[in-house]
Amino acid sequence: MKILILGIGNILFGDEGVGPHLANLIERKYEFTSDKHSVEIIDGGTLAHRLIPIITEYDRVVLIDCVKVDDGKIGDVYSFEFSDMPEHIKWNGSAHEVEMLQTLQMIEMIGDLPPVKIVGVIPYVIGENSTFSMTQEVVNASLTMEKVVIDYLKSLDIDVEIKKDLKITDVTNDTYTKGIEYDIGV
């Protein structure tokens, strides 16, 4: 089985970059081995619908992003299957992008959507000003998010080994160098 860990978000908007930052952390911190499965990690940034051909290549997806939740507070972490999304969650990904929710719904409509596990956190939304800094609430929440992703992979019989002890704050300064190569046709 091909498993994709996909970080979604805009690193220019503080907490909304947690998806790419956490994907970067997981890639640098862990080694994954399995006789039956492979794990790939991608920083999807804000590409949304342009990720459709990538997402459909996988048998299972773990999507790390931001969520909106009725009566939730900054730093609250939620984990759910896309096919069984709780009604109180208004999951719509990061600001300033074509929404991942609509992207997943489009893939689902054409019948090519693999099982998708969402691991999301409520961000502090900064509006129009840009910053690379995340709030302490989301930095703390990233520990829970990381554990949820790793425990999920272990539940799929994937061996997980720490190759370098890192925290999310150790990788935020170079996440901008990651991401997928995308030919814009120019």
Image (cartoon, rainbow, N blue to C red):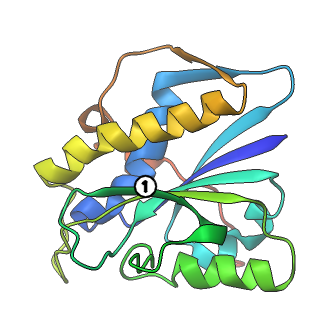
Q: Residue 133 location in percent, x, y?
A: 17, 54
Q: Is residue 83 above or below residue 154?
A: below
Name the image quarter holding the N terminus: top right
For residue 140, side relative to residue 2 (left or right): left
For residue 156, side relative to residue 148 (left or right): right
Residue at horizontal 60%, vertical 85%?
Answer: 102
Residue at horizontal 45%, vertical 79%?
Answer: 92
Query: What residue sits right under mark 1 in the picture?
Result: 19
Q: Quadrant of residue 18?
A: bottom left
Q: Residue 64 location in percent, x, y?
A: 48, 55
Number of labelled discs? 1
Residue at horizontal 87%, vertical 77%?
Answer: 111
For residue 116, side relative to residue 89 (left or right): right
Residue 25 visible, this angle: yes
Q: Residue 11 location in percent, x, y?
A: 33, 61
Secondary structure at numbered mark 1? helix
Q: Residue 135 location in percent, x, y?
A: 14, 54
Q: Residue furthest left?
A: 136
Task: Name which residue type carries label 1.
Answer: Gly
Residue at horizontal 48%, vertical 34%?
Answer: 26
> As rendered, which of 5 and 180 lies closer to the eye?
5
> As rendered, which of 144 and 30 lies closer to the eye?
144
> As rendered, which of 173 and 105 lies closer to the eye?
105
Name the image quarter holding the C terminus: bottom right
Crowding at dot 1, Cα within 10 Å, few <14 / some 14-19 / many 20+, comes out as many
Residue 24 visible, this angle: no
